[in-house]
Image: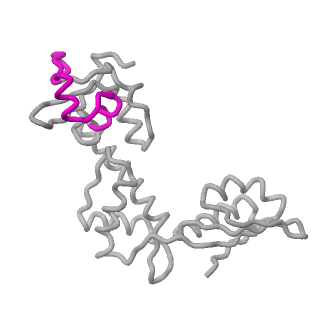
């Protein structure tokens, strides 16, 4: 547990009251990196304050009214997601850049240009988001922000989320070293072993990942993997 003198303040103003928690700065670094954390492990004190530095506390009735719960973990999550965290301008800039990069990477991996059936390059997506004046929230989960990002992108880029089916063929000796990659990229819906010892699988993956999957498998098999989109 962090020392009180080193803790940072997360603050939410609602229902005419101020609610604060004292938080380990390390939590912000983990959130910035997109990690899921147990906030209880990063609270300097498992309590809610009106003014954390003075130690004044709201009544239980006011906490229940504002948050609908007395669970400190749920309260802390709401304060962090909806309120303000006492971080430096440089920390906030780093968090915004990291979260935006995650959003762009997600869209690039899962969306395609329906006109060409190919994914948009990440730089094109990033520039389009800048043009659309998309505002990244450093504390809001990526999946919650992707929908808003896509809404802003559609008037600028031909883009949509799409999954596709691919057939993958591997030599028997290559299957084991490629297994983790296969399940990382998508769902193997059907598979069978051939008489010559090779493996064939039918997979569903995000359309934007076909090129990456092909490259990954060929790097593991010295170019012996075959990946074909099924129309």
Q: Residue at x 38, y 39 (%)?
A: 31
Is 38 left or right of 211, judged from the image as shown? left
On the image, the x and y values in percent for residue 15 come to 12, 36
Give the quarter of the figure containing the N terminus.
Answer: top left
Marks counted in the figure total 0
- Quadrant housing residue 165: bottom right
Residue nearer the viewer, 94 or 62: 62
Is 204 left or right of 53, judged from the image as shown? right
On the image, the x and y values in percent for residue 105 come to 45, 59
Residue nearer the viewer, 128 or 27: 27
Q: Is residue 52 magenta?
A: yes
On the image, the x and y values in percent for residue 73 come to 35, 30
29 versus 22 height, above or below: below
39 versus 226 height, above or below: above
Q: Residue at x 30, y 20 (%)?
A: 6
On the image, the x and y values in percent for residue 166 come to 64, 72
142 versus 2 height, above or below: below
- Quadrant housing residue 14: top left
Residue nearer the viewer, 158 or 141: 141
Give the quarter of the figure containing the C terminus.
Answer: bottom right
Residue nearer the viewer, 124 or 19: 19
Q: Is residue 103 magenta?
A: no
Q: Residue at x 24, y 42 (%)?
A: 82
- Quadrant housing residue 200: bottom right
How does the figure colour the protein chain or chains? one colour
**Outermost residue, right direction?**
195
Is 101 left or right of 16, judged from the image as shown? right
Q: In the image, which residues are magenta?
A: 50-78
């Amino acid at each position: 547990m962090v020392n009180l003198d080193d803790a940072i303040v997360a603050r939410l103003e609602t229902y005419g009251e101020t609610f604060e928690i004292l938080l380990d700065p390390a939590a912000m670094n983990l959130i910035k990196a997109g990690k899921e954390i147990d906030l209880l492990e990063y609270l300097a004190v498992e309590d809610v304050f009106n003014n954390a530095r003075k130690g004044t506390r709201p009544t239980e009735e006011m906490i229940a009214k504002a948050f609908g719960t007395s669970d400190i973990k749920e309260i802390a999550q709401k304060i962090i997601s909806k309120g303000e965290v006492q971080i430096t301008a440089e920390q906030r800039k780093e968090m915004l850049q990291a979260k935006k990069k995650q959003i762009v990477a997600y869209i690039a991996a899962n969306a395609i240009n329906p006109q060409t059936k190919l994914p948009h390059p990440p730089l094109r997506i990033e520039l389009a988001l800048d043009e659309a004046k998309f505002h990244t929230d450093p504390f809001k989960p990526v999946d919650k922000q992707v929908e808003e990002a896509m809404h802003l992108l559609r008037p600028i880029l031909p883009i949509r989320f799409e999954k596709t089916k691919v057939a993958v063929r591997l030599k028997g000796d290559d299957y084991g070293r490629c297994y983790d990659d296969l399940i990382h990229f998508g769902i193997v819906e059907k598979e069978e072993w051939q008489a010559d010892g090779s493996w064939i699988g039918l997979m569903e993956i995000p359309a934007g990942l076909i090129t990456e999957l092909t490259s990954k498998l060929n790097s593991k098999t010295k170019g012996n993997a075959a990946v074909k989109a099924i129309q």
